[in-house]
Image (cartoon, rainbow, N blue to C red):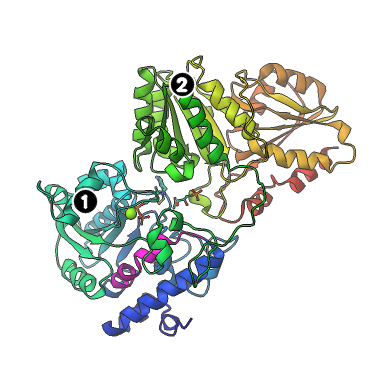
Amino acid sequence: MSIDLLKTINSSKELRKLPIELLPQLAKELRKFIIKIVATKEGHLGASLGVVELTIALHYVYNTPKDLLIWDVGHQAYGHKILTGRRDVFETNRQFNGISGFPKREESEFDVFGVGHSSTSISAALGMAIASQLKGDTTKQHIAVIGDASIASGMAFEGLNHAGVTNANLLVILNDNAIGIDPSVGALKQYLTNVKKGTQKQDNIFEALNFDYSGPIDGHDLSQLISELERLKTVQGPKLLHVITKKGKGLKQAEDNQVTYHAPGKFDADTGELATKIIIEQPPKYQDVFGFTIVELAKKNKDIIGITPAMPTGSSLKYMMEEIPERAFDVGIAEQHAVTLAAGMATQGLIPFCNIYSTFLQRAYDQVIHDVALQKLPVIFCLDRSGLVGQDGATHHGVFDLAFLRCIPNIIIFAPRNEIELRNIMYTSQLGKLKQPIAIRYPRGRGVTLDWKQPFNEIIMGTGIPLKKGSEIAVLSIGTISKNCSEAIDKIERKHKISHYDMRFLKPLDEKLLHTICKTHQSIITVEDGSINGGFGTAILEFASQHNYKNTFKLLGIPDEFIEHGTTEELHRECKIDSISIFQTITGLL
Ligand SMILES: Cc1ncc(C[n+]2csc(CCOP(=O)(O)OP(=O)(O)O)c2C)c(N)n1
Ligand SMILES: CC(=O)[C@@H](O)[C@H](O)COP(=O)(O)O
Ligand SMILES: [Mg+2]
């Protein structure tokens, strides 16, 4: 593949020197380049392919990085990275020690705001625009590019609502491709569809909010984009440009199957075909254990409801949406709403399973406390992608949940060791005995059990279980990190000295078991794939201190820093919670 033109662009300055007639050629090369690298290195594909022309037009018209350009979520910013000095390192995208999959301030002066979680761009750009006003800078432009699914989130509305009563120099570009990861949902999506079709009868929503609205325009037509952006540069106050694009543009499979090609894994760069996977029997993904189990339970228990904020495929709630659509809700990127919606349902005797990626639950912290826990409502939180998630990196690791949930009264916190435990706790939670919320956290990826679809067993709340009995050192783990502990213990010669307990519940702690452990072991090692500050290990230390135990304690977990991207194995090693590091910790104490 020739990238003769792309090779000459090392920053937006060089791009701006190109004659406009060469831009379509640049778009072609940029698209090819993105496809070539993502095909082998993996990552987000469809979103970046859809904004190739928009990316070129923005850097062509605006004086970046002096003009400030913010990409919402940032999964569509590969073209931006490649055109702004990162072409030659783009093959390290999302790899350990490589560049980040999202815009990141430390990485480049062109990445003016760090992103990863959606719907922040309008508020951030408005903040920058107000700062420019206060500093008397009237030349600087401030641009937020936000997708149709992300603009429907509460935070984006809050930004629009504020911007509309300012005269800040803000341009919001609505990149409308009518899909998020899964198809966009909600009344705003219907409104945008009507605008596109020209059948919208009511007032323009954005004009009603005092924005200068233009569009919809074809987001793949470079000359139309450039002339409209040039015009908007001269318009004062808040502006919204509605751009229509196709997610996956330029790769047929990605255009035809937008959900799969959002982040397709490896594929053939020439044909677009997904890499064929060798079919060997594998344990299921935890998300599928959740997805299949909720369907199984909901068929028998008519009160069960499933809720996902915009992640039906990622959470596998899609299975319930297909089979029992009237009781399974995709509410869009609306984590706060998802939690309070579940709370409302719980007041009426329904049994809501509210499935949220651990990292995105951070958005709904007040709702968990104020709307659920304070009122002791039996909402069942299923926190997928907990622990280190891998290549999405610092913005997406689900490592704070244990610590931020533990300080909330009334909530039960459970982490299954394997698929069977996940099924059993889901079963236990819907029996009608739950009088308070429960958070069940489980990781991204596959489990450990081929024969996972076992008959259900009730789990007794607040009980841990011994996995191996020894005499000197007790390893206490919570959740799936137990596997690394077992592997570590297996390698130890004097393994008869080592005990291993799966504590299962962070809250309530199994105090009876803990008393026994503290009385019968010299040393205690706690292992968690969550933040070391305030999580599982801290809870054990607090227990020991309250009861005056003087054992030697060693806490293993995520250190007090943000962990970047890499494979989960690499990151476990970095955090010293891989089996070899755990082995070394144990032998150090023997
Ligand atoms: C707060 C939050 N919730 C969920 C996600 C997961 N997520 C990432 S991209 C995406 C869809 C975004 O759709 P849209 O804004 O339309 O952009 P597109 O992918 O179509 O370019 C979602 C739900 C997220 N990043 N942040
Ligand atoms: C950009 C974003 O937030 C999502 O696309 C996220 O990367 C999905 O993660 P999973 O691949 O774990 O579903
Ligand atoms: Mg979209």
Q: Earlier in the sequence, mark 2 or mark 1?
A: 1
Q: Name the residue rendered at 50%, 23% in the picture.
A: 411
Q: Nearer the viewer, residue 498 or 535?
A: 498
Percent x, y of residue 104: 45, 59
Figure quadrant of the C terminus: top right
Q: Name the residue rendered at 13%, 51% in the picture.
A: 199
Q: Which mark is residue 96?
A: none
* Disc 2 residue lies near ligand 2 with CB under 8 A: no
Q: Name the residue rendered at 67%, 47% in the picture.
A: 281
Percent x, y of residue 539: 62, 27
Q: Secondary structure at mark 1?
A: helix
Residue 225 shown left or right of residue 358 in the figure = left
* Disc 1 residue lies near ligand 3 with CB under 8 A: no
Residue 80 shown left or right of residue 278 in the figure = left
Q: Amino acid at mark 1?
A: Leu
| 21 relative to 415, above or below | below
Quadrant hosting residue 167: bottom left
Q: Nearer the viewer, residue 371 or 124?
A: 371
Would you say residue 77 is visible in this rendering? no
Q: Does residue 45 belong to the magenta stretch?
A: yes
Q: Which residue is mark 1?
A: 192
Q: Secondary structure at mark 2?
A: loop
Quadrant hosting residue 174: bottom left
Q: Amino acid at mark 2?
A: Asn
> Magenta part mainly helix, strand or loop?
helix
Q: Which residue is mark 2?
A: 301
Which residue range is magenta in the image? 43-59
Would you say residue 285 is visible in this rendering? yes
Residue 53 shown left or right of residue 30 in the figure = left
Measure how far apart labels 2 and 1 are at the Cα level. Answer: 37 Å
